[in-house]
Amino acid sequence: MIIIGERINATRKPIAAALEARDSQAIFRTAREQLQAGAHYLDINGGDPRPAREAENIAWLVETVQGSVDVPLCIDSANPQAVKRGLSLAKHRAILNSISLESSRLGPLMPILEQSDCMVIGLLMSDQGAPAGVDDRLRNAEQLIKKLTAAGRKPEDIIIDPCFLTLSVDCLSARAVIDAIAAIHKEWPKVHIGGGCSNVSFGLPRRRYINFALLAGAIYHGMDTALIDPCTPGIMATLYAAQAVAGKDEFCMNYVTAEREGKLV
Amino acid sequence: MIIIGERINATRKPIAAALEARDSQAIFRTAREQLQAGAHYLDINGGDPRPAREAENIAWLVETVQGSVDVPLCIDSANPQAVKRGLSLAKHRAILNSISLESSRLGPLMPILEQSDCMVIGLLMSDQGAPAGVDDRLRNAEQLIKKLTAAGRKPEDIIIDPCFLTLSVDCLSARAVIDAIAAIHKEWPKVHIGGGCSNVSFGLPRRRYINFALLAGAIYHGMDTALIDPCTPGIMATLYAAQAVAGKDEFCMNYVTAEREGKLV
């Protein structure tokens, strides 16, 4: 399981404030909390509509985080300038979050990908918008994996984000995404699958239960990457429990070890 | 979804004490709490190794519960005398919990089943013991459904309990049971599937997360009956969330209504 901590994101108020004030202590804390909770990667999002400013934000966040903790990063932007800065400053092999089939994203980001050895999240969006069912997700996955492979990525360097949609808008959308995960996992067993899925529960009460049920179903069918807030109570326990139930945790050792390390809180 | 509250069970100390003292107030409370939490049926287990005493216990429990609340019951025993007493006293159409392919259970209970119109839980145990995989569960389900159909049960009156085993003993056992649920649901779409699954997490820390992940996976694949303690924090929210994620809750109405009724606490 690849767990990417999502909290260092400038669209979140505390991070926007920390960025504005160049408050490195606040960023240190957010980085350390997520690592303690069990994140393997930290997402870095500089969220500013002005490309040059976003690139500056990303650069400052990357250097600040790396000045405090030793962790690989996930550079979260569709802005080529910001992505380039972030990747070039990352000490460890980073993940680019994300490319897609949208020509506005694919065109500018592909050359960067060809010059970097980063891992990459491939979001199954296209110029036709978000996929709705299983078949269009499979078609998009095939196209995207082909392009990423041509750009030098091995299957194990690719993380397909199946595009998690909002359940309250379409009550069959979670089923479609889980069935698509199963189909993608069957067709490309070495490709990682996952992404940010908390918007599935948007608009519903007690969102965490919807998120947990979604994660359990998706992990059962092959999701192995999660962009989450690992500090949310119960979420790490849910991830480890879902893996154990899916038969992907021999002797339940990872689950029991995570408990011993205080990660199931 | 059929939710059966499991708390009125004489193998639990407070119920054993209430039975011993014929403390009907304690039984009332346990019945009401479960109904408030969202149970549709209440399981009644008189747990005594002496058949006549167990039958007496069941009779007292059935009459006591029915003296306080209006709810259908699930008569939980393999003792023909106790089952007969329980079914004959039940005001509403009850569930017999449970018959199986074990000859010690099948032989004595089948005649009772032929004379009653109760629903029935068919546990996939046989004289060969508990099933380990998908194929043996399917074989047992076929045999049991055939026998129950011959005894006058319609598919929708049968609840197949796939036999939930302990994950810490065999880390592939939850996967086997979930895949078996999918196969049984595909083959007999009108037959209900489910049972008590909390022993899946036996021996593991923070058992509720294992139980929640198991429920989410099983419900995704067709489980629609749960023998649980509905007062366990989070369990009702998990059941409703799992149904919504599985695409079985149009407009997420049941989930939202359950929240409004205070059942997702």
Image (tube, coloured by chain):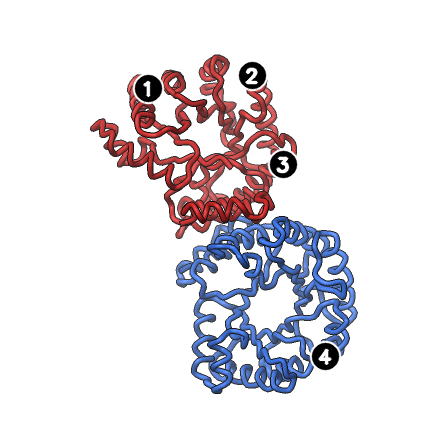
Chain colours: A red, B blue
Q: Is there CB contact under 8 Å for labels 4 and 1? A: no
Q: Position of residue A234 (x, y in %)?
A: 42, 49
Tell me, yes or no, if residue A209 can be seen here. Answer: yes
Name the residue that disc number 1 marks.
A55
How many angstroms separate mark 2 from mark 4 (CA)?
A: 69 Å
Sequence-wise, the earlier of marks 1 and 3 is: 1
Name the residue that disc number 2 marks.
A152
Name the residue that disc number 4 marks.
B112
Which of the two residues, B238 or A95, is positioned nearer the viewer here? A95
In the rendered view of the protein, which quadrant contains the N terminus of chain B? bottom right
Up-down relation of residue B53 to residue A182 (above or below): below
Residue ID at (49%, 50%): B251
Closer to the camera: disc 2 or disc 4?
A: 2
Which of the two residues, B40 or A60, is positioned nearer the viewer here? A60
Residue ID at (31%, 29%): A68
Q: Quadrant of residue B107?
A: bottom right
- Amino acid on which the number 1 mark rests in the picture: Ala
